[in-house]
Image (tube, helix red, strand yellow):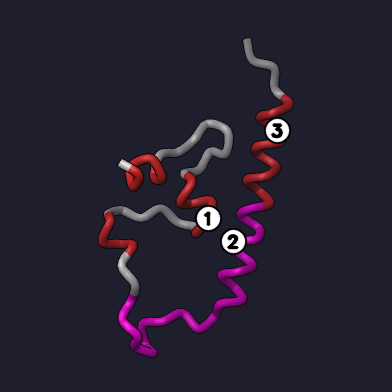
Amino acid sequence: MEFAYNRVVHSTTQMSPFEVVYGFNPLTPLDLLPLPDIDSMTNKDGLAKATFVTNLHKEVKAQIEKKDGEVSF
């Protein structure tokens, strides 16, 4: 149930909670398994991923602030 909740797109952020944290939505629980420790399969560009997630968090924050400013009845 937690996996399903974390994959659902929320109206405020327009993203799932998992996507906000990691930058992608897993397709199945198997997508969450760690990769084997093989050099050819690991991402060596951690800075690019960190920058991507930082920018993603800025976009989500802006979306939340935009949603908070809307009046709903």
Question: Which circle marks residue 53 in the picture?
Answer: 2
Badge 2 amino acid: Val
Residue 47 x/y as whole percent: 61, 76
Q: Is residue 71 left or right of residue 49?
A: right
Q: Which residue is mark 3?
A: 66
Mark 3 is on which residue type? Answer: Lys
Residue under the point 60% across and 73% down: 48
Q: Is residue 58 left or right of residue 50?
A: right
Q: Residue at x 47, y 44 (%)?
A: 16
Q: Which of marks 1 and 2 precedes in the sequence?
A: 1
Q: Position of residue 37 (x, y in %)?
A: 35, 85
Q: Are marks 2 and 1 in contact (CB under 8 Å)?
A: yes
Q: How many marks?
A: 3
Helix, strand or loop at mark 2: helix
Residue positioned 49% across, 46% down in the render: 17
Where does the N terminus fall, quadrant-wise?
top left
User: Dot 3: within a 10 Å radius of its alpha carbon, few (fewer than 14), some, or many (20 or more) residues?
Assistant: few
Amino acid type, label 1? Val
Q: Where residue 57 sits in the image (x, y, percent)?
A: 63, 53
**Mark number, residue 21:** 1
